[in-house]
Image (cartoon, rainbow, N blue to C red):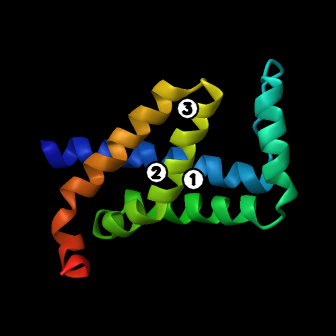
Amino acid sequence: MKTKILFIVCLLFGLMFINAGLNKFFNYMPVPKDMPKSAMAMFGALMQIKWLMPLIGIAEIVGGILVIIPRYRALGAIIIFPVMIGIVLTAISLSSGLIMALVLFVILIWVIIENWAKYLPMIR
């Protein structure tokens, strides 16, 4: 039962990151009209670095795909981890979307804990 729940959660988590990564290339999700000026300034500054958004998009797409596949879930979690840290820090600094960011972060930590045995050879 636990493995089925983990698979469903990882499937939704992975699809969310694949969607976010694809949006960085195709811009099909509209920007909210009521976005604070501080958020617009921050995202505008990030867009000035031409290679950053494609890099984050590729990491989100690859990590999302790998998190869905049980055999490669540990690798996908490690790829998504730095992106997730950025998402949480952005949510904290903008004071919006923090609940969703924390839920995704908890899911990622759960995936990492479930695959902890796969990380041990790198630590030793």
Report the residue at 83% width, 48% height from top. 45
What residue sits right under mark 2 in the picture? 14
Number of numbered labels in the structure image? 3
Residue positioned most to the left: 1
Local secondary structure at mark 3 = helix
Report the residue at 77% width, 57% height from top. 25
N-terminal of the pair, mark 2 or mark 3, is 2
The answer to which image quadrant residue 72 occupies is: bottom left
Residue 119 falls left or right of residue 41:
left
Three-letter amino acid code of the residue under disc 1? Ile
Q: CB atoms at circles 2 and 3 under 8 Å apart?
A: no
Q: CB atoms at circles 1 and 2 under 8 Å apart?
A: yes
Three-letter amino acid code of the residue under disc 2? Gly
N-terminal of the pair, mark 1 or mark 3, is 1
What residue sits right under mark 3 in the picture? 92
Q: Is residue 18 above or below residue 31?
A: below
Residue 10 in view in this figure? yes
What residue sits right under mark 1 in the picture? 18
Q: Quadrant of the N terminus?
A: top left
Which dot marks residue 59? none
